[in-house]
Amino acid sequence: MIGQEYDVIVVGAGHAGNEAAAAAANMGCSTLLITMDMTKIGQMSCNPAMGGVAKGQIVREIDALGGLSGIVSDLSMIQFRMLNKSKGPAMWSPRTQNDRARFTEGWRLALEKIPNLDFLQDMVTEIIVEQGCAKGVKTGIGVAIKGKTVVLTNGTFLNGLIHIGEKQMGGGRSGERSSKGITEQLVNLGFESGRMKTGTPPRVDGRSLDYSKMEEQKGDVKPGKFSFTDTKPLKTQKSCYITYTNSTVHEILQTGFDRSPMFNGSIRGQGPRYCPSIEDKINRFAERDRHQIFVEPEGWETIEVYVNGFSTSLPEDVQVKAIRQVPGFEQAKLFRPGYAIEYDYFPPTQLKQTLETKLIDHLYFAGQINGTTGYEEAACQGLMAGINAANCVQEKDPLVLKRSQAYIGVLIDDLINKGTEEPYRMFTSRAEFRLLLRQDNADIRLTETGHRIGLVDEQRLENVFDKKNAINSLLDEIKVSKVSPQEVNDNLTAIHTATIKEKVSVDKLLKRPEIGIEQLKNIDESLQLMLSDYNEDVLEEVEILIKYETYLHKEQQQAEKQESLENFRIPKTFDYHQIKALSAEAKEKLSKIQPATIGQAARISGVSPADISVVMVYLGR
């Protein structure tokens, strides 16, 4: 290992680092994964869950491309829920509750099976840079390791500082030391850095809780899964629970505000807007007399419970006193208190679309180092950084996903064009083509790409082709099949939808809000026979394609229009300051971000449509 030159060196074995290392190694590159603690590979530092709104779509996209997060999640899940089923399919989002220990174990076992992947337990303190290009790393014990590319996925460890009340201690996670040296080196090389903050709630002894005072939250009756491979859905599930804070809890928490790092100036970093601490919630939303608390088991056998919604950095005595006023927590025993953590990040406008840095060639950033929050956001960045590092070494074209192609494309495009001053979290509302980017069709959208880059095998590709053929076949059958009033009117009346006066095609019936695939089966025996030839995934896909046909067509047209702007390349040497008609802000932003295309330039905050028109004139468009 020492003395060997690697194609790809990945620093950090969290969600981003694991996906980066797995992708690069599976694409045939000699890869080294360096972590400070081999027992914490793939650690769920915050809540033991994967997916959720928009995040679930990302996990399915990672899986479709050949990443491992979906498989590891499926193998370690203890509960599955499809969120937002009462809304349209663009909003349906899979989420798993996971066994924390099995998730970590699953990641390590999966990585250890990859032949081209080596491991090293050490701290990276410096990037070896020669003539503006990353050439390897130096570690805490003084070892220099050569590498053709380097991927940094340092999470919250860069100069990490943990806060509990007025206490401060260096650390990247509870009980783990922070990473020193890299930030300082990169700043000296010309990078801009900043500070962000995140937090975590107390962990409690589940035996000390009274679940009879809480609302039980069961998993889906027919649980699904993330991966498009042959992982198995759950047969039994473990329940979560919901309870609420109250005015007494809030009053107790407020007694500690003078010792809170959130309010006494100890914390300078910006925290996540959409996952605030409990003290931030009661301060910002003072009119609310209660806040929801999700009580989440940490695994199948463990008694440890995660108190989701009670993230805090208040002093331990205030935490204990307040949490014991929450219904069901009257006798709660804390395993460890909640805490806040500050860490360094690098504004992602300093990156290319491949996640390679603009200042240093062959150096890639992925995960929280780019200002994002969440396992899923980190994992997809790691996957893309690993893929592009491998492509760089193998002298292949980079992989850049479009906004109309994947949530992953939306996330990276947002980061490099708009940057972020607070931890970035993905939502369906960030995607203008979210009806095209559904969780159910991630395999159809991305598996061929995964196969082309070498992460998806032939069998998976054939499965997708079979699914496409089945969908097209059923669509054709439904559109040509017709039913008469005599055959279906009685059943239409029974489900409270209008009867028909003449023969109509089945697709017209399916467009009615009262009628889905299941209702079609009961309307007519011949329809039931026809539909019985197809599996549930195909039936669901066809129902969506028919019901939302008009909207899908409109989004596709918009996507094609946007794509036409992506074909207008901007030369790397283009000087925006020569264009007098551009606004001062546009000159500054365009020069800093250096967009590769007109489409990318149009999405930069502060660049107006008039500025884009002027640039296009100068480009001869």
Image (cartoon, grey):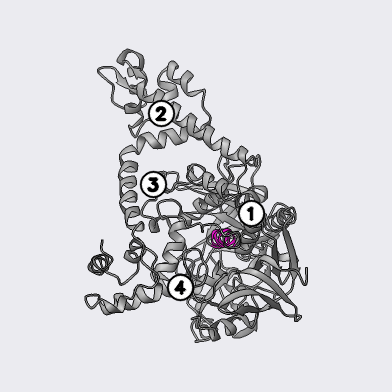
- The residue beneath circle 4 is 422
The CA span between labels 1 and 4 is: 34 Å
- The residue beneath circle 3 is 435
Q: Secondary structure at mark 1?
A: loop
- Residue 286 is drawn in which quadrant? bottom left
Q: Secondary structure at mark 2?
A: helix
Q: Amino acid at mark 1?
A: Met
Instruction: Answer above or below: position of 513 versus 610.
Output: above
Q: Amino acid at mark 2?
A: Leu
| Residue pictured at 39% horizontal, 36% vertical | 545
Q: Which residues are magenta?
A: 378-389
Q: Earlier in the sequence, mark 4 or mark 2?
A: 4
Asked whether the viewer can see residue 218, the reply is no
Q: Is residue 386 magenta?
A: yes
Q: Earlier in the sequence, mark 1 or mark 2?
A: 1
Q: Earlier in the sequence, mark 4 or mark 3?
A: 4
Of circles 2 and 3, the one toward us is 2
Of circles 3 and 1, the one toward us is 1
Q: Secondary structure at mark 4?
A: loop
Q: Residues within 10 Å of mark 1 (few under 14, many from 20)?
A: some
Q: Earlier in the sequence, mark 1 or mark 4?
A: 1
Q: Are marks 4 and 3 in contact (CB under 8 Å)?
A: no
The CA span between labels 4 and 2 is: 45 Å
The CA span between labels 3 and 1 is: 31 Å
